[in-house]
Amino acid sequence: MPALVPIIEPEVDINAPDKAAIEAELKKGLLARLDTLDPASPVMLKLTLPSVDGYFRELVEHPSVLKVVALSGGYGRDEANAKLARNPGVIASFSRALTEGLSAQQGDAAFNQALDATIESIYRASIA
């Protein structure tokens, strides 16, 4: 594995009325470009959770892709976890969903308990 791995992060707005069409064009463009890369120098893809379950399968299995990670993209944690669980081979790269429900006003114990539960739920969705 190379020491440096480029990360490609084309985020799709989850509220776009034509989100599925955007995703189709994005996937088509990514696959065309991935086919030109040397698999010995793979890339990571950081993508918004798709509208169609399992939609990233070809990207996950592409020899020039080291890993596909999912952005929560503004979905709440429960919805993001549910969508992630329906996309085998994709793992979470959630920030908004990770911090949901956390606050500086929480005591240490409550904050740590909430963070632990959040991490566990995201982990479970990543391995579903």
Image: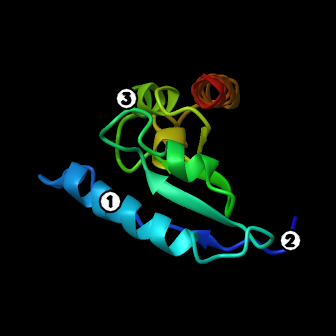
Q: Where does residue 4 sit, x and y in percent of width and height?
A: 80, 75
Cα gap from disc 2 to disc 1, whole angstroms: 28 Å
Q: Where does residue 46 sit, x and y in percent of width and height?
A: 54, 58
Q: Residue at coordinates 37% horizontally, 35% vertically from top-left?
A: 76
Mark 3: few/some/many CA within 10 Å (<14, 14-19, 20+)? few
Residue position marked by numbered label 2 in the rendering: 2
Look at label 1 and name its amino acid. Val
Residue 103 appears in view: no
In this rendering, the label closer to the viewer, 2 or 3: 2
Q: Which mark is residue 25?
A: none
- Quarter occupied by residue 8: bottom right
Q: Which mark is residue 12?
A: 1
Residue position marked by numbered label 3 in the rendering: 79
Look at label 2 and name its amino acid. Pro
Q: Residue at coordinates 48% horizontally, 29% vertically from top-left?
A: 81
Circle 1 — which element? loop
Left or right: 97 as drawn, with respect to 121: left
Mark 2: few/some/many CA within 10 Å (<14, 14-19, 20+)? few
- Quadrant of the snapshot with the C terminus: top right
Instruction: Please say if 56 is above or below 18.
Output: above
Q: Residue at coordinates 66% horizontally, 24% vertically from top-left?
A: 120
The extreme left residue here reads 17
Circle 3 — which element? helix
Look at label 3 and name its amino acid. Glu
- Depth check: give the residue in front, 114 or 73: 73
Residue 87 appears in view: yes
Q: Earlier in the sequence, mark 2 or mark 1?
A: 2
Circle 2 — which element? loop
Q: Earlier in the sequence, mark 1 or mark 3?
A: 1
